[in-house]
Image: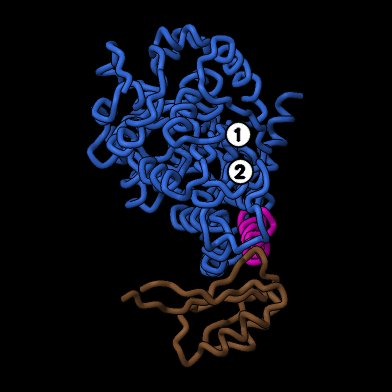
Chain colours: A blue, B brown
Amino acid sequence: MNLTEEAPTVATRRLLHGLSEAADPRLAVHHELWGVLRPDKADLVAQVDASGLTGRGGAAFPVGAKWRTVAGASRRRPVVIANGAEGEPASRKDAFLLARAPHLVIDGLVAAACALRAERAIAYVSRASVSCLGDALAERQAIGLDPIEVEIFEAAPSFIAGQETAVVEALGPRRTAAPTFAGLSSIRERGLNGRPTLVQNIETLAHVALVARFGAAWFRQLGTDTEPGTMLLTLCTDEGPMIAEGVFGSSLARTLGLGRRELGASGGVLLGGYGGGWIPTDVFLGLPVSEKAARRAGGTLGPGIVAVIPENVCPLAEIADVARYMETQGAGQCGPCVYGLADLADGLERLAYGGPGGPSPDRLLEVCDLVDGRGACRHPDGVAKFVRSGLAVFAGEVNAHRRHGACTATRQGGALPGTTRATRRKLVSRA
Amino acid sequence: MTRFRLELIVDPVACEGRGVCAEILPERIEVDRWGYPIVDGDIAPALFDHALLAMRSCPTQAIHLVERAC
């Protein structure tokens, strides 16, 4: 275990430590800030387990347990993949981390690969991040820092590009023999080229890089017993995205600088992205940075996305636009998802933009029930959650639209990114 | 001694909603508004033969009868 003397003790900014002033991603600056990490394979799996670190890609799965599954899966040497695809349009924290602190991510990837005796270490990132990652790797290669070569692959810019099986399918054949039913074995046991495969979000690996340096006890100094440490958050508002680092257990709203004034008369906040859920504003203001608390409130933090739509924008229009976007972003492989998401988008558009007499919430909820759990991945499940929570939080607007048709606020639109209206709005504002 | 139960599971990628399985085993399989199966997968011994036939009759081999330890 490699422990440097100057472990930051009280810092509530860990991953973001030192980034605001310097914002210099170079290796020398990285080593000034954090010291040099020499991977010590024997200890790290135990330290990660003890740290209580959970995945930061959205599922919040315990990292130690995931590593143990991969390590114990077979005698074949595993593959470790750093997942920086960040397909959610409202999320920017992974791109931010790769641009400002690529060496933390690579440290974590290499440490994981060594701890698991991996045969390959792959960084799967969006196009925008390829060059800064390449530069960072070149610096490390020049001094022979890493015992394993890190390969860079560019991820497609689609919503589901970061989904675990999609990552593996993009990188090569999964099975070495005849196709077998995907539901019977997991990627961790049989993934890329049939090898046990660890797919880990790049932010998670950045935390691993710190656990490897300072240990599990240090990691647990911040946060709560059940949710130790910190997580990155992307706040998505009309003024553009903002990245913050939240300590588990502290106030989510205060971490993001959001009070009643900033939220205005907006009835709800979107947590967790387009597969996440809407939370009433009052409930949001009382939430800690906590996946458990978010779930108790009927939502999820997901990959740390918090989206606020302006008062003058119709929430039903945003929900309809996102539902249509999510329909286009499915893999197109499973009938219930293909047909169900189309039906949902049709119904929501009719409700948001059409005249009076639009579909009842019950009809839309029936479709949600029919798509939930019926696909090979969680894409339709996420849409179901997004729509159900939206219909609940904005029940007033739903009633008003059914009685009177589209409100004037539907003309303002494109607040949530990635949708057709948002893209059009961006293009118009640039012209 | 480990006990096993039988479960019918659908591979949603392979399934094309042809509906053969639902015709063979209506006790456990119904069809949604788009033609895709909704499966109540727990298979009692009395239904085993039909479940096996449903698996073998699927034109895209999208439904599987598996053993689960319980």
Q: Is residue A53 left or right of residue B49?
A: left
Horizontal and vertical percent position of residue A184? 53, 63
Name the main secondary structure of what is drawn in magenta.
helix
Residue at position x 64%, y 39% in the image:
A418
Amino acid marked by disc 1:
Tyr
Query: Which image quarter holds the N terminus of chain A?
Result: top left
User: Does A108 appear above or below A344?
Assistant: above
Q: Amino acid at mark 2?
A: Val
Secondary element type, mark 2: helix
- Check chain identity for marks 1 and 2: say if they share one: yes
Name the side, left or right, on which B8 lies relative to A171.
left
Q: Is residue A355 visible?
A: no
- Residue A326 spot, x, y in % from top left: 63, 50
Percent position (x, y) of residue A396? 47, 56
Depth check, front residue: A307 or A164: A164
Look at the image and say whether residue A243 sits in the magenta stretch: no
Tell me if mark 1 has few (under 14), some (14-19) or many (20+) residues whose alpha carbon lies within 10 angstroms of its own. many
- The chain letter for the residue carrying disc 1 is A
Q: On residue A124, which mark appears?
A: 1
Specify which label sits upstream in the sequence, 1 or 2.
1
Residue wearing tag 2: A167
Q: Residue at x 70, y 42 (%)?
A: A420
**Residues in magenta, as a range:** A331-356
